[in-house]
């Protein structure tokens, strides 16, 4: 007698049991086990066509996993939806010392519905929803002109390199859904559809000034490095960038420019001026602003305050993504459909919200793929207290199926 399809609790238990902090050798070995487990599940139950993309980072091999359901032939035209998630987890083993728990142990927490385990929230519960959601998906898609590509990537926790490597496998997408969690999500957060993410950019500002150690100098001299650093910091905090004229009031915050770290370097020799460095973080929500314009405004304001002797340079990394800001118009039919489907799932109106921060989804959005995030009820990502309310997995599956089945137009629209 064939075995029954494993319930979501068992799938999540299996996924948590694999160590997948893939920046470590142990994590890469666990990633291989995870991919084999998913491959076996997909093949045993004929859930879709599976493929693996290998890519190299710093001499180590990593893997992205794709599962296609209802993919059209060359002569067919179908609308492609992406279910996007990541298999890797943050390496937090040191945080678990003294807690009595192991990161890969799936343990019940303070109630029958809450479970601890590294990756439960970020985002193995979301991956579980994808895998459970593959059951019945072919029959749903047979009534539509859609197909689904599930993209499960590596290295989200390390510069989002998996998603960058997967771009050619994602560009056919016309919309996408993530089940990742917003940063600092809590168990008390009400159900919501997140569909806007502010861009983040960091600029390194280098400042030159006089050293107070170079001879008899007036300590009040404004050309000394310490007061120049203070002037630069105050100037940065006072920068106000243009807000987007059509943002719904209260939905997205205004653009924020603030200094986030100071460092004064002593000169290597008595004839060398000291150097000050300020890390400037910008959270920007206006799609009409690009990074060059933001950089120009920072430089212009500092030039007025310091009259020279400084340098501004954009820092390029995933931690502060080098992407354009993205804001999905709430009138977009894809966003409207997502809110309506989620509301139907919960039997009550579900809010649309701006996201408190995710890593991979803005990369797809920047490439023209509208994204929504529908997260589980979870908390504690990147900590020893990471946990998931398993009751939130079935609604995620229903949401995925509802979006696949909807007769709404998700693509064509006039802003």
Image (cartoon, rainbow, N blue to C red):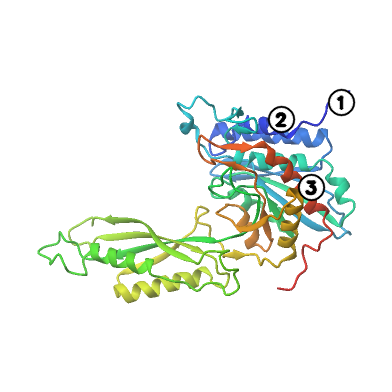
Crowd band around label 1 with a 10 angstrom C-alpha radius: few (<14), some (14–19), many (20+): few
- Per the rendering, the mark at residue 10 is 2
Residue 289 pos. (x, y %): 53, 71
Residue 389 pos. (x, y %): 64, 38
Residue at 86% across / 51% down in the picture?
141
Q: Is residue 89 left or right of residue 141?
A: left
Spatial distance from mark 2 to mark 1, Cα to Cα?
A: 17 Å
| Quadrant of the rendering where the C terminus is positioned | bottom right
Outermost residue toward the left in this view: 216
- Per the rendering, the mark at residue 68 is 3
Q: Earlier in the sequence, mark 1 or mark 3?
A: 1
- Per the rendering, the mark at residue 341 is none
Q: Secondary structure at mark 2?
A: helix
Q: Earlier in the sequence, mark 2 or mark 1?
A: 1
Q: Is residue 71 left or right of residue 333?
A: right
The correct choice, above or below, for 300 with respect to 85 in the image is below
Q: Secondary structure at mark 1?
A: loop
Q: Nearer the viewer, mark 2 or mark 3?
A: 2
Q: Is residue 329 left or right of residue 102?
A: right
Label 2 close to label 3 by CB (< 8 Å): no
List the residue tagged with mark 1: 2
């Amino acid at each position: 007698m064939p075995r029954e399809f494993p319930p979501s609790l068992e799938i999540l238990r299996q996924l948590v049991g694999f160590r997948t902090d893939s920046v470590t050798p142990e994590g890469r070995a666990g990633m291989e086990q995870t991919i084999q487990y998913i491959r076996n599940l997909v093949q045993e139950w004929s859930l879709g066509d599976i493929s693996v993309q290998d890519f190299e980072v710093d001499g180590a091999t990593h893997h992205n996993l794709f599962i296609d359901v209802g993919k059209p032939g060359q002569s067919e035209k179908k609308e492609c939806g992406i279910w996007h998630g990541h298999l890797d987890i943050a390496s937090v083993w040191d945080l678990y010392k003294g807690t009595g728990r192991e990161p890969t142990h799936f343990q019940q927490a303070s109630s029958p519905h809450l479970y601890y385990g590294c990756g439960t929230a970020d985002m193995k519960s979301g991956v579980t929803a994808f895998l459970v959601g593959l059951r019945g998906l072919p029959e749903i898609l047979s009534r539509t002109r859609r197909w689904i590509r599930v993209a499960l990537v590596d290295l989200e926790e390390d510069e989002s390199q998996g998603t960058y490597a997967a771009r050619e496998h994602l560009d056919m997408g016309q919309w996408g859904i993530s089940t990742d969690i917003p940063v600092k999500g809590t168990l008390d957060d009400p159900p919501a559809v997140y569909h806007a993410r502010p861009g983040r950019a960091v600029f390194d500002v280098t400042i030159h000034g006089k050293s107070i150690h170079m001879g008899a100098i007036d300590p009040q001299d404004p050309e000394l490095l310490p007061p120049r650093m203070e002037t630069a910091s105050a100037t940065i905090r006072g920068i106000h960038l243009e807000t987007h004229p059509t943002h719904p009031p209260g939905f997205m915050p205004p653009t924020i420019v603030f200094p986030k770290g100071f460092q004064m370097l002593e000169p290597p020799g008595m004839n060398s001026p000291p150097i000050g460095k300020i890390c400037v973080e910008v959270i920007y929500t206006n799609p009409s602003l690009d990074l060059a314009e933001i950089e120009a405004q920072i430089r212009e304001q500092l030039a007025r305050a310091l009259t020279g002797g400084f340098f501004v340079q954009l820092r390029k990394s995933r931690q502060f993504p080098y992407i354009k800001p993205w804001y999905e118009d709430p009138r977009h039919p894809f966003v409207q459909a997502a809110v309506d489907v989620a509301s139907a799932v919960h039997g009550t109106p579900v809010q649309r919200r701006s996201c408190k921060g995710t890593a991979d989804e803005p990369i797809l959005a920047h490439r023209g793929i509208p994204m929504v995030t529908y997260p589980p009820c979870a908390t504690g990502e990147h900590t020893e207290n990471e946990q998931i309310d398993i009751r939130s997995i079935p609604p995620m599956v229903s949401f995925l199926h509802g979006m696949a089945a909807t007769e709404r137009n998700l693509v064509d629209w006039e802003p």
